[in-house]
Image (tube, rainbow, N blue to C red):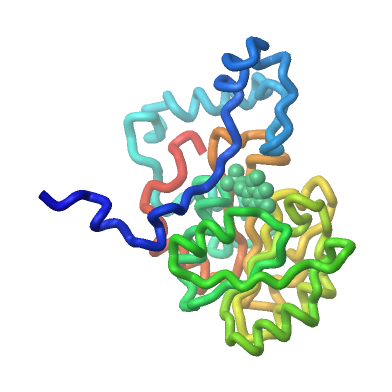
Amino acid sequence: MARPLKFVREDLARVSYSPVRPLDVISAEIGIPPHQIAKLDANENLHPVPTEMMEALTSALTSFSSGCSAQIYPDPSQTNLRADIAAMHGISPDRVVAGSGSDDILDIIMRLVDTDSCIICPPTFGMYKFLGTIMRINIIEVPRKENFQVDVPAVVKAIRETKCKLVMLPSPNNPTGTILPNEDIRVICQEDCLVVIDEAYSDFAGVSAEELLDEFPNLILCRTFSKWAGLAGIRVGYAIGHPDFIERMLAIKQPYNVNVAA
Ligand SMILES: Cc1ncc(COP(=O)(O)O)c(C=O)c1O
């Protein structure tokens, strides 16, 4: 009988993401109740979810009369959610697509873009390399400068030399907190590639590349409710970008990728 691992891609034989360890597991291990532990390794909210939010989530899971309830599949077009997010940003809903966290958004982008490589600037968020490996996308690492700023001329050089069509850069960066100034994003966006700016922490720094979206159709921003809204467990993130690209993201995403409570 053939053994199942024979059918597994050889390059995935040893690949795995090293996720942070769950609070309840750590709590049981060290014998301290979860509410007395300040767990900081995943940038999660340390405080309980506000009552108002809990009530809204519960109501969304149980309001069968409104057509939205736990036993019903969520809206694949994310009509209400996209409209609400669009209103929050003062843009039209056709520029927004939501995902099961911004991890899902990054995954959709990796699957959609016709590229055999992706440029990242380490030290940076581990998910880019993980997703790229799974997609057989070669990860090109352009190291940051000593002060952790992105080496913009080196990124531009790498894009041109490798003909890479995808660049993924967080601002602020995880784990260094370094902000990528909009002047630098503007320089990179002038190249012939899709530029993804991961703004998971942008609300804490009061920065965003939103003002560049009209200028650069090749710019995509990723946002999440996991950090500023403290709702990492609910898994809602989104992308903002050009309607043509967003339409393709909507088309190829998992139909029910965002939970019904969102
Ligand atoms: C830079 C960055 N992007 C994206 C994410 C993923 O966030 P989400 O919970 O929305 O998948 C994280 C989570 O730590 C992050 O640090």
Q: Is residue 189 left or right of residue 22?
A: right
Q: Is residue 193 above or below residue 13?
A: below
Closer to the camera in the image, 47 or 154: 154
Q: Position of residue 188 (x, y in %)?
A: 73, 79
Residue 170 visible in the current orientation = yes
Q: Residue at x 72, y 23 (%)?
A: 47
Quarter of the figure with residue 139: bottom right
Residue 59 drawn at (x, y percent): 50, 24
Q: Please report the residue visible at 24 percent of the width from the left and 57 percent of the height from the top.
A: 7
Check the image and name the residue furthest to the left.
1
Q: Front-most of 189 and 83? A: 189
Give residue 181's quadrant in the image. bottom right
Mark yes or no: residue 80 visible: no
Image position of 220 (left or right of 70): right
Query: Where does residue 114 sit, x and y in percent of width and height?
Result: 46, 77
Residue placed at 71% from the left, 38% from the top? 43
Q: Residue furthest right?
A: 147
Q: Is residue 6 left or right of residue 23?
A: left
Q: Which image quarter: residue 142?
A: bottom right
Which residue appears at 77% of the width and 73% of the height? 185
What percent of the width, then of the height, locates residue 118?
Answer: 58, 72
Q: Is residue 53 above or below residue 13?
A: above
